[in-house]
Image (cartoon, rainbow, N blue to C red):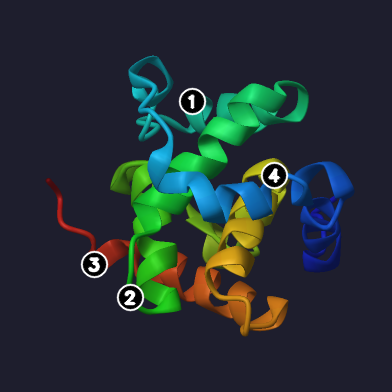
Amino acid sequence: MTPRISEVKSCFSKADFLSTLPSLEMHVLDLPNASDFHANLPAVTDEELLLIDWKLKGDKSYREKLTRHLYRAGGDGSTLSFMTKMLKALFVRDVAIQYSMYGKKGKKPFVNLVEICAIMFGVASVKFPHINQDDISERLSRALALVCDWSCK
């Protein structure tokens, strides 16, 4: 069963996730780099991506590190640009091209990566507080649709 976007949205509205966001926004640039954390990013296989999503369920420290990493990776610019940069930090083109937001056109549904989606929605909500969740969903969906335009570097 494919989770609905409302199920994904409910994940990041939980108090334990939201409690990390205010400090994230204020201190994200002051945090030290964790080189061992970045060793498995971007994911180069679908299995690595699934492992990341699985690890997020039980490892609060890993969740916080990935949240900070994606916030930093998103940089500045438009919401679409921010989403694209987060996706590039998360996985390589060869993995990304296998996904669409809801699994259309024979691709894998990105929303099935519930923990990763929750973090991406939460980080985007902090970065762009004036944008509602439906707009964030649309931008993420669009960023996934544009994966074929990523350079092959």
Mark 4 or 3, closer to the camera: 4
Mark 4 or 1, closer to the camera: 4
Disc sitting over residue 20 in the figure:
4
- Of 141 and 104, nearer the camera is 141
Most extreme residue toward the left is: 153
Q: Percent position (x, y) of residue 82?
A: 40, 66
- Label 2 sits on a secondary structure element that is loop
Circles 1, 3 touching at the beta carbon (< 8 Å) = no
Q: Name which residue lies at 60% across and 75% down.
A: 136
- Of 91 and 62, nearer the camera is 62
What's the CA distance linking mark 4 and mark 1? 25 Å
Disc sitting over residue 48 in the figure:
1
Residue kind at label 1, given as amino acid type: Glu
Circles 2, 4 touching at the beta carbon (< 8 Å) = no
Query: Which badge, 1 or 3, is on the more N-terminal residue?
Result: 1
Say which residue label 2 marks.
77
